[in-house]
Amino acid sequence: MLTDFLASEGTLHQFSCPYTPEQNSVVERKHQHLLNVARSLLFQSNVPIVFWGDCILTVTYIINRIPSPVLNNCSPYRILYNIAPDYSNFKIFGSLCYATTQKHERHKFSPKAEPTIFIGYLTGVKGYKLYGLESGKKYYL
């Protein structure tokens, strides 16, 4: 079990009382920070609320890569991996972009690209998540 593993590693695993978020002050502050930034991002982008999960993941991606005064102006990414994060792949959440349609999915007179909106980053892969405005399909490019 998790508790046994944590104990073997020297970690004391404690639970908070139900309905007392104030007992998890650090976690609650980070949770509130994520939600505040995600709410701003969602409202500014005019993206439908159904993309709230993608918005939270995007906010987490961004926050982990920007410098923090708490970490002596280093980013969590830099501290974890000991390399500076790459900001060149940052995109604007909800922005219009075009996804190339695959050759096997189109015929001679089909459009070669579909209008999409940027809804996030892929984990572990250098790519983006896009949502097709016409097809309603999610693209992972």
Image (cartoon, rainbow, N blue to C red):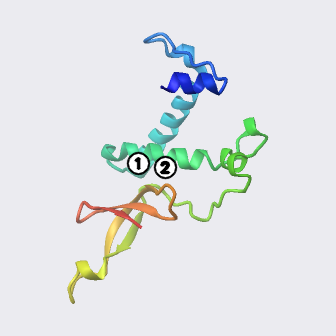
Picture coordinates of residue 121, whole percent (x, y): 48, 57
Residue tagged 2: 58
Picture coordinates of residue 133, whole percent (x, y): 28, 63
User: Which quarter of the figure is the C terminus placed in?
Assistant: bottom left
Q: Residue 137 bears which disc, if any?
A: none
| Residue found 35% across the figure and 47% down from its top | 51
| Residue found 57% across the figure and 49% down from its top | 62
Picture coordinates of residue 132, whole percent (x, y): 30, 64
Picture coordinates of residue 108, whole percent (x, y): 21, 89
Disc 2 residue crowd, few under 14, some 14–19, many 20+, Cα 10 Å: many
Residue 108 in view here? yes
Secondary element at image label 2: helix
Q: Residue 54 bears which disc, if any?
A: 1
Which quadrant of the figure has residue 11?
top right
Horizontally, is 33 left or right of 93 in the view? Answer: right
Q: Nearer the viewer, residue 109 or 96?
A: 109
Mark 1 and 2 residues: CB-CB less than 8 Å, in contact? yes
Horizontally, is 50 left or right of 126 in the view? Answer: left
* Image: 73 above or below 140: above
| Residue found 63% across the figure and 60% down from its top | 87
Which amino acid, by three-letter code, is at mark 2?
A: Thr
Alpha carbon distance from label 1 to label 2: 6 Å
* Image: 19 above or below 99: above
Which amino acid, by three-letter code, is at mark 1?
A: Asp
Secondary element at image label 1: helix
* Image: 139 above or below 46: below
Which quadrant of the figure has residue 56?
top left
Disc 1 residue crowd, few under 14, some 14–19, many 20+, Cα 10 Å: some
Horizontally, is 71 left or right of 104 in the view? Answer: right
Residue 26 in view here? no
